[in-house]
Amino acid sequence: MGMTDEERFRFDLSGFLVRPAMLDAGQIAAIRDQIHTIKHDPQSLPPEHRAVPSGPSSILIDHPAVIEVLHEIIGPDIRLEGSYCVWRKQGEAHGALHGGGPQQADPIFGYRVLNGRIHAGMVRVVFELTEVGEEDGGTHFVVGSHKANFPMHPDHLSLEEGKRSPFLLSYACPAGSAVFFTENVCHAGPIWKKTEPRVAVLNAYAHLATHWHRLSLPPAVLAGLPREKQAYFRTPWVADFRTSPATTNTIERFVGNNESPIDTNHQP
Ligand SMILES: O=C(O)CCC(=O)C(=O)O
Ligand SMILES: [Fe+2]
């Protein structure tokens, strides 16, 4: 169980890792269907299914082969900060290269390895629901930049053919694969080149004690999730010293009580 030595080596060296073919054909089809409806006819869905990660896509929240990697690269206590999906047509893009370099010092994004353990800040997991070829325009990474000590050099920030950094790499994978990357690696969602749209769910996980994205999940979607999946959206704290011994913010504790996953003090 857990990451293989090769996966750990690869993720540490490059800043990203692909676990191929983690979903079966039925799961892929159901999530693709949901995303198609979210993007083209959301009103036909019940309110609790109008955004990911709900309904068919809720299996992605706590997929065991994803969680085991996140526990090794973030730590045993994690939250899901945000989730979105794309139905990216040929010619569309997410945008330019971003991240990398001095962000390394930031506690939210920083990437450290100490005592034989990886401590990554925010980690994005892309579930590819379309087959992706190396040249198709999947997510691209300036490998190693998650550990860079100097600002990203402009010579390495182009997505233009012929001007790309030799360190800019992507991946090929079948539909149903998970792509993990530290948000500290310089990355981009370049122009999608394939005629078949890129369909994907992108989840951002972080340490239980940190909080970057303000929760944007519609309340009906959150309310519609089973308690053990809502637990991944629990409020960001680790220990409550009002009790003795201190209470820890575990998934088991959350599942066993009625607490809202939303910090009601901070709602607009
Ligand atoms: O669309 C992509 O491939 C990359 C998305 C991205 O940059 C992100 O979600 O942080
Ligand atoms: Fe990004």
Image: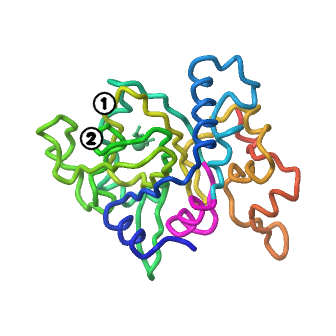
Q: Residue at x 74, y 48 (%)?
A: 230
**Quarter of the rendering occupied by the N terminus:** bottom right
Contact between marks 1 and 2 (CB within 8 A): the answer is yes
Q: Nearer the viewer, residue 13 or 217?
A: 13
Compared to 237, does 141 lie above or below?
A: above
Q: Is 166 displayed left or right of 52 in the figure?
A: left
Q: Which residue is mark 1?
A: 193
Residue under the image location 55 percent in, 72 percent down: 2
Q: Residue furthest bottom?
A: 115
Counting from the top left corner in percent of width and height, residue 187 is at: 33, 46
Residue lying at the far front in this picture: please name it: 25
Q: Which residues are magenta?
A: 64-80
Under tag 1, what secondary structure? Answer: loop
Which residue type carries mark 1?
A: Lys
Report the Cα–Cα distance between label 1 and label 2: 8 Å
Q: Quadrant of ligand 2?
A: top left
Q: Is residue 192 left or right of residue 27?
A: left
The residue beneath circle 2 is 135
SS at circle 2: loop
